[in-house]
Image (cartoon, helix red, strand yellow):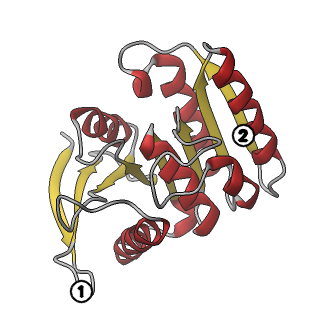
Amino acid sequence: MIERSLEQISLSGDSGLRLSVAVPESTMRGAVVVAPGSRSVTGVDRQLATGLAGEGWLAVIPHLFHSDATERLTEQSVLADTGAVLGWLAQREVSADRVGVVGFGLGGAVALLVATQRELGAAVTVEGTGVVQPGAAGLPALVDVAPALRCPWLGIYGREGEALEEEVRKLQDAAHSARVATDLVRCRFDADCCIAPEAWTRTLNWFGSHLR
């Protein structure tokens, strides 16, 4: 049975960073940080974490909005929080090259941003928002930071919409200019976009190939 828990990391000048954790029942292959797609951790986020744990990954969801109701994500807060998560994982003997990050929507944007600033094993962005214009105040547009990717990155986007097609093409070009392996694919999504079969399979394959 997959073990689930709520942990907390102490942060200077703050009440702390909460983590929703799903622990695999089998031998742990590494860890995947699941960036939430909205202000609160949703059932979809937890379902994604549970699925990853079922594949042998220690899945950690950081509650990125943790100060007050008016808090906004910024590049600095995202990097501070994910840095704390990496430290928490290091204490559990999970080295950075065995850590991946994944997210859907806003979480997908966070995953790409983290992959440009932290030493990780791999990253996956599913339908990441803010491709050519920032998806949230305080966060950069994805095309502006993608050339700085520091670990293998996979982008997964839907197939519909002419405007989206142009944006995705720009992101693909920006990512390909990075000095790491990158790929961007188009998938057909259903109502549960981030766990649609094709996207899920590609995500697992990407982490399985790069987190060793």
Quarter placement of the C terminus: bottom right
79 to the left or right of 44:
right
Q: Residues within 10 Å of mark 1 (few under 14, many from 20)?
A: few
User: Where is residue 89 shown, x and y percent of the image?
Assistant: 38, 69
- Residue at 38% across / 40% down in the picture? 52
Q: Nearer the viewer, residue 180 or 42?
A: 42
Q: Is residue 77 visible?
A: yes
- Residue at 34% across / 36% down in the picture? 48
- Residue at 47% across / 61% down in the picture? 138
Q: Which mark is residue 163?
A: none
User: Where is residue 124 shown, x and y percent of the image?
Assistant: 56, 43
Residues marked 1 and 2 touching at CB (< 8 Å): no
User: Where is residue 68 shown, x and y percent of the image?
Assistant: 17, 64
Decide: is 121 above or below 205.
below
User: Where is residue 35 shown, x and y percent of the image?
Assistant: 39, 50
11 to the left or right of 58:
left
Q: Kindly indicate the quadrant of the structure image that contains residue 121.
A: bottom right
Q: Secondary structure at mark 2?
A: helix
Q: Nearer the viewer, residue 62 or 122?
A: 62
- Residue at 44% across / 67% down in the picture? 94
Decide: is 191 above or below 75.
above
Instruction: Inspect the image, locate mark 2, and give the three-letter code of the amino acid beneath it.
Output: Leu
Disc 1 from disc 2: Cα separation: 36 Å
Decide: is 151 above or below 194.
below
Quarter placement of the N terminus: top left
Q: Which residue is mark 2?
A: 171
Q: Which residue is mark 1?
A: 13
Instruction: Inspect the image, locate mark 1, and give the three-letter code of the amino acid beneath it.
Output: Gly
Decide: is 44 above or below 13.
above
Q: Secondary structure at mark 1?
A: loop
Q: Kindly indicate the quadrant of the structure image that contains residue 62.
A: bottom left
